[in-house]
Each structure stands twice: as structure tokens, then as C-alpha cells.
Image (tube, helix red, strand yellow):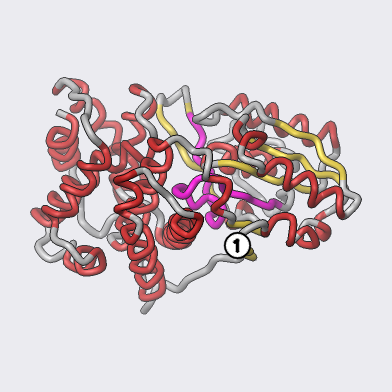
Amino acid sequence: MDAGFYVPVRIIGGENCVRKGAQHFAAYGRQALIVCGKSAAQNGALDDVKAALAANGQDAVVYDGIPQNPTVASVFTGARLAREYRADFVVAIGGGSPMDAAKAIAMLACQDAPEGLFDHKITSAVLPMIHIPTTAGTGSEVTPYAIITNDEKQTKQSISSPALFPHVAFLDGKYMATLPQSVTVNTAIDAISHAVEGMLSVRAGGMSDLFAKQALTLLFGEYESLLAGSYTPASRQNLLYGATLAGMVIANTGTSPVHGMGYSLTYFHGVPHGRANGLLLPNFLKECEKIWQGSTRKIFEALGMDAQEFAQRLKALLGRRKKLPEETLRDYAARAAKNKNIRNCRVPFTEENLYTVLKRSVG
């Protein structure tokens, strides 16, 4: 039986959709907490949100203290601000970090978590959320996941609940015009990884595969733009739509060992999340095929290329890579083997399989 498909988010897209869609903010209360990074003021998104809220007579306070990889401390600080301000809803502006942090903040604003963020059992009491992505990669605007840095375990860890789905997502590619080329490439690769990993999930189904294939069509349709670092408004929008579709995929399927391995590269070496995934993805697929022949066939059919061309295209986008010593890779494989993403993949991975992927990718 098909696994089914569920994404309860109203999606509004197109140029200037935030200001044009101001009425969609009105239903959620009078006072908003805006969660963002510093870039929201530079790319115009923050001004657009403030204008939309003002048009409805709504007030807002801005919390822009989210680091690149959100910490537990940063989300508890944001939740305290939301409570003090008596926010009725949360507006998230940015890439995965502000959007993921906003989910944790919206939850902690309504729920005490004395046992800690990662051990807390999330209830339905969560402030409503409106998300505005300013990168095309994470798909957080349509997922029930928030990835937060867990310093105690020295990794990134997710919290998840259907209550963490945003209510509304605005998709306007114009906010990506000021992104550095490296961020545009890394986030696009993150979205590609989501679509590919979703197709290998034990929870994949007919609907999720359809969305994954369309996401790959849109994302790789802009390969030449990514390679050249030259983007039209239409190409930015295509990347954003592709990333959102891939987000819908993992909202239903979850991710795979690629994410589990990549977290150590990000935590210990500061490798951006999407780049970490891209470094690992070709050799992960090669290992999948070795373990279970035919397991990757539908992925490369969807991509319209073979494994070698896929690896070459990612290599061209990623450039030079840092090499890590064997003992480090052994440690990262052991850490990844404990991640729940391992069990989510229909291809069974052992710690030795994980080490092999890491060794071939960054060894």
C-alpha cells in the first residue's frame, strides 16, 4: 500500500507575493515575533513583512539572533522573547537556520521543556507560523522538522511533530538575488539531496516520488545557471520551487544516511550542510548500488543521467574538497551509525558501509 502524502501548508508564490498577500497574515493575531538572520534586512524580505503586517494593523518585534547553525540557547532565548512580547504568531525569514529555529521557538513559547529540547514530547500547543525562505535548499517551509545543534552530543539533531508544520509559506525568488554564489550552490545541492534521499526512504510512495522527480527536473534544469553563477528571476524561482517540492518529499519520507554522515562534517569542520550532502551523495549512491543492485535505477532515470555524469556534475559545482584522516572518518561513521536516518533507508547500511562512503568522499 502507498505510504500516502501530507503537507498542510498554504503555499503562495510569485514576485512580491508577501506584500500582495498581506491578508494571509491577518488571521493569526495582532502581534508577531519575526525570527530571522541579519540578511533579512539586506534582501528586502524584512521590509516586505513589516509592510504586510502594517497593512493589517499588526505589530511585530524582531529577533535576529539566530546563528548559522541554531543552538539550543538561541531558541530558548527566542521563546522567552515571544512569551514576554505575548506574540500571537511567528514569522520566519531566511534559510534553514532561522526557519528551523522559528519552529522550536514557536513550540517553546507555548510548552515548557524541563527535560530538555530533544527529549521533550511535543504537543499540539504551538504558535502559528508563516515562513518566507530566502534560500532554495532546506525546504523547511513545508516540513515538520527543526534541525538544532546539540552540543552535548556534538552533532545536529532534529525535533519533529506535525504541530511544527508552518501554516503559510511565501515563495519569492527575488530574496535570493543577494546570496553569495557558494550559498546558492550549496542550498540547491541540499534540495537535490532531499529529493534523491526521499526516493530511497522506506516511507517513499507514488506521490513522494512524483514530487521528487519534478524537484530534480527543476533543480537540474538550472544546472548551467548554478555552474556559471548567473541567474534570471525565473531561474531563481525555479530553484525555489524545486527546493520546496523536495521539502515536501522529505516531510513525508524523512532523510537517509547522507544526512547522518553530513552532520559531523558540519559540526566539527563547519562544512555547510548542503555542501556536506553533496560531497557524500555520489558515493552513497554507489554504495547503495553495491549493497542492493537496482536500488538507484529510478533515481538516475529521474535525473536523466548515469552515476558517473551525476558525480561529475556535483564535482564541478563543489570544487576542491578537504581530506580527513582515517581515524576521524571511523569516528564519524560510528556516530552516523547511531542516527535514526540509517533505519529510514530501504538499503541496509552498516557502520562499515558508512565508513566506505566517507573514505571515498572526504578521505
Tell which of 321 and 286 is nearer to you: 321
Residue neighbourhood size for the residue with mark 1, other residues' Cα within 10 Å, grouped as few (<14), some (14–19), many (≥20)? some
Residue 146 included in the magenta stretch of the image: yes
- The residue sitting at the bottom extreme is 1
Res 13 → quadrant: bottom right
For the record, the magenta segment spans 129-149
Amino acid type assigned to the residue bearing label 1 in the image: Gly
Residue 275 as seen in the image, left or right of residue 5: left
Tell which of 177 and 25 is nearer to you: 177
- The residue sitting at 23% across, 25% down in the picture is 331
- The residue sitting at 14% across, 33% down in the picture is 359
> Residue 162: image x %, image y %?
59, 57
Q: Is residue 57 above or below residue 61?
A: below
Quadrant assignment for the C terminus = top left
Q: Is residue 245 above or below residue 137?
A: below
Residue 352 as seen in the image, left or right of residue 200: left
Residue 276 as seen in the image, left or right of residue 61: left
Residue 152 included in the magenta stretch of the image: no
Task: Give the structural element (helix, strand or loop) at label 1.
Answer: loop
- The residue sitting at the right extreme is 57
- The residue sitting at 18% across, 27% down in the picture is 330
> Residue 91: image x %, image y %?
70, 46
Quadrant assignment for the N terminus = bottom left
> Residue 106: image x %, image y %?
69, 43
Tell which of 62 and 363 is nearer to you: 62
Q: Is residue 263 above or below residue 130?
A: above
Tell which of 133 and 184 is nearer to you: 184
> Residue 230: image x %, image y %?
39, 46
- Find disc 1 in the rendering and name its residue: 14
- The residue sitting at 16% across, 20% down in the picture is 325
